[in-house]
Amino acid sequence: MTASHPRHRRALVIPAGMAVATALAFLPNTAATAAPAADEAAVTSAEATPLSYVVNVRGGHGTSAHVKKAIGRAGGTIVTSYDKIGVIVVHSSNPDFAKTVRKVRGVQSAGATRTAPLPSAATADMGTPKVLSAAEVAEAEAAEGQDPLQPLQWDLPAIKADRAHEKSLGSPEVTVAVIDTGVDDTHPDIAPNFDRAASVNCVSGKPDTSEGAWRPGPSESAHGTHVAGEIAAAKNGVGMTGVAPGVKVSGIKVSNPDGFFYTEAVVCGFVWAAEHGVDVTNNSYYTDPWYFNCTNDPDQKALVEAVTRASRYAERKGAVNVAAAGNENYDLAADEITDPVSPNDSTPSDRVVDPSECYDIPTQLPGVVTVAATGAKGLKSSFSNYGRGVVDIAAPGGDSTAYQKPEAPATSGLILGTLPGGKWGYMAGTSMASPHVAGVAALIKSTHPHASPALVKALLYAQADATACADPYDINGDGKADAVCEGPKNRNGFYGWGMTDALDAVTR
C-alpha cells in the first residue's frame, strides 16, 4: 500500500505475487478559494493558485480577533479552528499568505499544506490488492473454532494471537481508530465491531459526520478497510479473524480521492479521536506532500508543529498512537537520506535530508509507536524502513514469497485483510505491520482498562519478544547486505524491542 502509513508511506500496492509498501497522502476534493479582503496584501488575480494552510497560535484559547483580522487582510478564509491545540485551517489564493501571516503578533508558525492547488490535479497510485477468488474462499479449510480464512493468516500465530484468542478476544469497551483512506463498515467482518460514534470524514480538515462519510468511494483505495480488518475482523464464523476481534474499530477518513493525506485532514483526525473516546489510533501513512518535513523550512516546520500538537492532544486524552515506519528500506537513523518523491503532489526532485531535523510525520513524532515490518520467516521485510532508536517494535507486514514463504496451509507471504464490498485480499507493507501492533495495544488496554497511554506503551515494549539482528541481512541471496542492523537483541534497528506479543497482552 502506498500511503501507509506509512510510516509511511504510500499506499501499499500488491500486484499478485509482489509485496508493496504503504504510505498515504490526503487531498481534499473540494475547491475553496478565499474571498479577497479589502487589503493590498490580498491577491485578486483569477490566475492565483488556491492553497490550504495551517496557522499555529497559542493553544487553549479561542482564535483572537486580532489574528482573525490579520488572516483576512492577508487574503485568507478560515475553514475551521482547533482552539484547544491552537491550529487554524485556512484557504488562500495569496502566494505570500504564509510569509505575511507569520509576521502577525500571536502567530507561532504558518505554512502551506500542499504544493498543488485545491483541488489537486495529481493522482496517487494507491495500488491494487490481490483479491481472494470465490474458489480460494471456498477451498479454505479451517480447524474447529477458527474462522474460514484463518488458516491463510500466518501472521496471527507469528504474534501468538491465535493463542491469545483462547484467553480473550478483547473488550468492546476499547476502540481503535483507523486514520486512513476510509473504512467500509458494511463488510460482514467489520460491521459487528464498528464504532459509528467515533467515525468521521476529515478530508477537508473539518469533521463531516454525515452517514457513511467515513467510507471509501467506489474508486478509492481499499487500504483503510484492509487495515480495519487486520485489527478487529470479528470472530464470527465469516471470513478472517482480526488481532483483537472483540474490540471496536472506527473509521476516520483523512485521504482524498487522489490518495493524499494532507496536514489539515490528519490534524482533524487526531483531534476527533481525542474527543471521541478512542483508545488507540492506527496511522499507516505519511502526511503529504513531503516524505520528510524539515524544520529549517518555514512551511514544513508549521506542518510538523500542527501534527505534533494534534497527536500529543490525542495521547493526553487517552489514545496510544501507532504508526508505520515506511516502505523504502531507509535507515531512519542515518546521517542523511535522499528523498526522491517530495513534493509528491506536484514536481518531486531529489533532496538530501538530515533525519534528525527532517521528520516523517506522524511516524517520527514524540510519543508515537513506530512499527517495522517482518515477513513469514520472521525477518525484516525487504522494503521496511529501519533505524536504531527510531523503530520501537516489529510486527508482520508481509514480504514477497521469493524472500519469505509461509508454511502451509498459508499460500501467500502477504497479509490477508478485509476489502470493500464484502471481499478479502492480500496487501503488504509497514501499513500492514502497524495494525498488528495497534491490535495488541487494544488487547493490553482490554486487560488493563485503566492503564494510561504511557503504561500501555511500556507494556507493549516489555512484552515484545526480543529479536536479534540478522547478520548479514541478505534478503535476496545475492551475497550483498541489503541493510545493516545495529543494536542488541532487545533494542535494535530492525525490530526495536522485538516482535509484538498478543498472548502476553492478555495474560500479563
Image (cartoon, grey):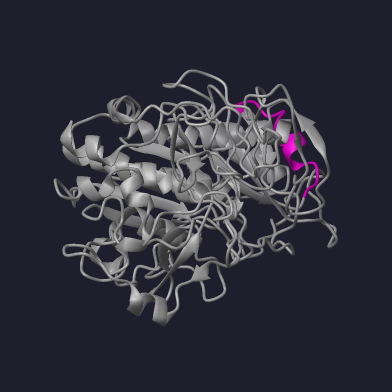
Q: Residue furthest left?
A: 167
Vertical arrangement, residue 450 with respect to residue 230, above or below: above
Query: Can residue 64 be seen by looking at this rendering?
Result: no
Residue 100 in the figure: left or right of residue 8? right
Q: Residue at x 59, y 54 (%)?
A: 402
Count of picture labels? 0
Magenta span has 11?
A: no
Up/down of 148 relative to 437, above or below: below
On the question of residue 290 being in view, the answer is yes
Quarter holding the N terminus is bottom right
Q: Give the answer, above or below, for where 189 lies relative to 487.
A: below
Q: Which residues are magenta?
A: 94-107
The residue at the far top in this view is 488
Is 18 placed left or right of 183 in the picture?
Answer: right
Q: From what the image shows, is residue 236 above or below residue 333?
A: below
Give the x, y percent position of residue 455: 28, 26
Q: Position of residue 431 (x, y in %)?
A: 50, 49
Which residue is depicted at the point 29% across and 58% down? Answer: 197
Horizontal and vertical percent for residue 350?
A: 83, 40
**Horizontal placement of 495 versus 499: left or right?**
right
Who is closer to the viewer here, 32 or 22? Answer: 22
Q: In front: 221, or 410? A: 410
479 or 450, nearer to the observer? 479
Residue 326: x and y in percent read 58, 42
